[in-house]
Image: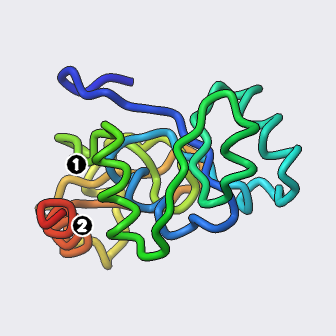
Amino acid sequence: MSDGGRSERRFLLDVMLGKLATFLRMCGHDTAYALDRGIEADERILRLATAENRTLLTRDEQLAAQADDAILLTERDVEDQLRELRAAGVDLSLPARPRRCSNCNGELAPADADEAPAYVPDDTETYRCRDCGQWFWRGSHWADVRETLAAL
């Protein structure tokens, strides 16, 4: 999927990087998380990364060394991990419209406002995950993530 020349990437995050998945998904990157797939063993993580042509993100030096394509992160704090990814050339800007479900990584589709549940603010562009059905809009969480990314 393209968004005005944005460079979207396919990632697989190991079990230590769950919080990072939300940020990458909100930036439009196709981001699989090992625990969402029920995978913890290193050899299965490596096979999945290869099979799905994903860049492995990990804090495990040995695991990173075994991968064909990996980014080794050293930091524990998610904002510091985001800084490391930015330094590695990963685009960490929010797309013009939400692209990925921050919950399951499914693709978001524009939805009609009259379909949206009552808790969605009126006069808001709404999106719905094609996979899990969750509703999204650019509200305070979107603004908070934009602010966090701008401060990196």
Q: Residue at x 28, y 57 (%)?
A: 114
Q: Residue at x 67, y 58 (%)?
A: 60
The image position of residue 40, as x and y in percent, is 83, 60
Label 1 environment density (alpha carbons within 10 Å; few <14, some 14–19, many ≥20): many
**Front residue of this view, candidates 63 and 14:** 63
**Front residue of this view, candidates 7 and 74:** 74
Asked whether disc 1 touches disc 2, contact meaning CB atoms under 8 Å apart, the reply is: yes
Check disc 2 and report the residue beneath it: 145
Label 1's element? loop
Amino acid carrying label 1: it is Leu
Residue 55: quarter of image: top right
Drawn side of residue 112 relative to residue 14, left or right: left
Query: Disc number at residue 141?
Result: none
Compute the Cα span from label 1 to label 2.
8 Å
Residue 14 lies, with reference to residue 139, above or below; the image says above
Drawn side of residue 147 relative to residue 25, left or right: left
Tag count: 2
Residue 103 lies, with reference to residue 127, above or below; the image says below
Residue 4 lies, with reference to residue 143, above or below; the image says above
**Front residue of this view, candidates 114 and 49:** 49
Q: Residue at x 74, y 62 (%)?
A: 35
The image position of residue 130, as x and y in percent, is 53, 44
Query: Disc number at residue 94?
Result: 1
**Front residue of this view, candidates 107 and 34:** 34
